[in-house]
Amino acid sequence: MDDLNIVLANYLNEHFCNVPLESPLFYSAPLGLRFELGVPYRGIENSSYFTNILLRSSMIFRDVFDEDEQMLVVVKSFRCIEPYTCYNQGEDVFPQYIKLRSFAEQVNSIELERHIENNGNLSGITYQHVLQCNIEHIDYIGILKAKAHQDFAMEPYISDAVFFINTHKHIILYMYDDRGLDLIAETKEALLPIYLKYNSWILAYDKERIDNIFKS
């Protein structure tokens, strides 16, 4: 099997040159959409808040990814080295949210960065994990739900950054937390149907900028 981290690097260099896979993804790309997922109030008392987040994020997801299209799922995680402790770590995306356990063996992982304290001690390591699959192979609903929980004392939750890449349409989907979701693409045409369909969900703060791009 090809080294998926090399496949990912080559793909990003060809289609998303100079756009790093990191938050905030929307502000790093020339073409993108930023959606508000939850109602303005952020809190666990109102269950409809999380219902709305999952509804919006899953609807957008299904408009980006078709059943037969391959995707790259990229997870960036930070792991502490003892005696240092990570708080709010959450669940591991792989293999927790892979539907077919045989696919867990196909996850390709590399070490991205070592974090050294001022005293010279290694406090943690950032890893990048990549899986190539179809939508049927991964529990994307579970991942979206867990991302919505990451800032609250609610199980399950994921603190790792998760990027879904449609390598056919050349669209990257990134839900940063319960507040919102970013889409970036290689071409404006790839995002135009989603822009038109979910225009009322676009984050008000960025709507003027987005409208200027897609109405030009």
Image (tube, rainbow, N blue to C red):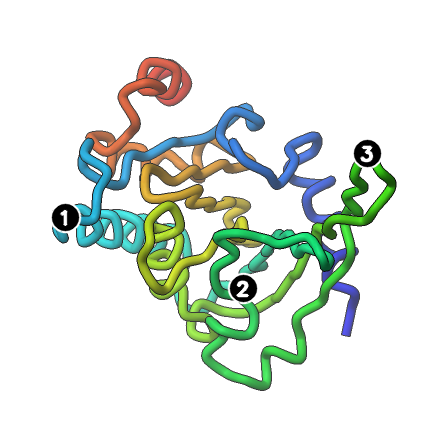
Q: In the rendered structure, which disc, 2 or 3, sits on the residue that comes first in sequence?
A: 2
* Percent of width and height locating residue 191: 40, 37
- The residue indicated by pointer 3 is 118
Residues under labels 3 and 1: Cα distance? 41 Å
Q: Tell me the CA gap for discs 2 and 1.
A: 38 Å
Residue visible at 56% across and 59% down? 73
Callout 3: helix, strand or loop?
loop
- What residue is disc 2 on? 70
Q: For the residues carrying marks 2 and 3, which lies nearer the camera in this image? A: 3
Which residue type does callout 3 highlight? Asn
Q: Secondary structure at mark 2?
A: loop
Q: Nearer the viewer, mark 3 or mark 1?
A: 3
The image shows a total of numbered marks equal to: 3
Q: Is residue 165 visible?
A: no
Q: Amino acid at mark 2?
A: Gln
Q: Nearer the viewer, residue 89 or 67?
A: 89
Quadrant placement of the C terminus: top left
Q: Amino acid at mark 1?
A: Glu
Q: Relative to residue 119, is residue 158 drawn left or right? A: left
- Label 2 environment density (alpha carbons within 10 Å; few <14, some 14–19, many ≥20): some
Q: Residues within 10 Å of mark 1 (few under 14, many from 20)?
A: few
Residue 197, quarter of picture: top left
Q: Which residue is mark 1?
A: 45
Locate residue 180, reporting x and y percent. Answer: 35, 38
Q: CA distance from mark 2 to mark 3?
A: 43 Å
Residue 83 placement (x, y as % from top left) = 71, 57
